[in-house]
Image (cartoon, rainbow, N blue to C red):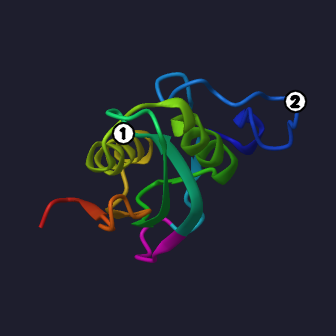
């Protein structure tokens, strides 16, 4: 995808997708293919819904990846993550789905998705998923 192929960047009239299935993770060419370097994306305001109670869940997501030929465009990632706001899902499923969707979109050499979810009933849950699995 060329920069001119990006559909969200620079277009403020776009609405948030209703679900991750509707969201599109856009990518662009890695500026340094062949060089091993890490990109860290810090997302402190993630939210979703508890599938049992319907109450909102909040999390601090950190996505850290070593790109292959493609990098994720951050506005599309923002829209993608915001699409979870109305999705009832367990915390562990969310972290693993984010990982799977990012791997499918850009085929990174390595990626780690870490979600530190807000406390529920006095217990704070952190879930981490990796590709490739080690």
Farthest-out residue, left: 134
Q: Position of residue 130 (x, y in %)?
A: 25, 61
Residue to which mark 2 is pinned: 13
The one of 128 and 2 positioned closer to us in this rendering: 128
39 in magenta: yes
Image: magenta residue range? 33-40
Q: Main secondary structure of the magenta part?
A: loop
Above or below residue 117? Residue 95 is: above
Give the alpha-carbon distance from disc 1 to disc 2, as whole Å: 27 Å
Is residue 26 depicted above or below 45 in this figure?
A: above
Callout 1 environment at 10 Å: few (<14), some (14 to 19), or many (20+)? few
What's the residue at 56%, 38% (across, down)? 85
Label total for image:
2
Residue 72 appears at what percent x and percent y? 55, 51
Q: Is residue 25 visible?
A: no
Precedes in sequence: disc 1 or disc 2 = 2
Give how far across and how far down residue 41 sits, in percent: 55, 66
Residue at image mark 1: 104
Residue 61: tell me if it is visible.
yes
> At numbered mark 2, what does the secondary structure look like: helix, strand or loop?
loop
Q: Residue at x 54, y 48 (%)?
A: 47
Whether label 1 touches label 2, CB < 8 Å: no
Label 2 crowd (10 A; few <14 / some 14-19 / many >=20) = few
Horizontal side of 127 relative to 21 (left or right) equals left
């Amino acid at each position: 995808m060329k920069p001119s192929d990006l559909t969200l960047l620079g277009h403020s009239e776009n609405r948030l997708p209703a679900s991750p299935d509707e969201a599109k993770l856009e990518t662009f060419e890695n500026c340094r293919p062949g060089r091993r370097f890490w990109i860290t994306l810090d997302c402190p305001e993630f939210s979703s819904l508890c599938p049992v109670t319907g109450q909102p869940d909040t999390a601090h997501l950190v996505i850290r990846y070593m790109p292959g030929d493609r990098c994720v465009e951050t506005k599309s990632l923002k829209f993608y993550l915001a699409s979870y706001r109305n999705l009832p899902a367990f915390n562990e499923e969310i972290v693993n789905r984010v990982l799977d969707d990012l791997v499918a979109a850009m085929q990174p050499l390595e990626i780690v998705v870490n979600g530190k979810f807000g406390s529920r009933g006095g217990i704070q849950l952190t879930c981490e998923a990796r590709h490739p699995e080690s």
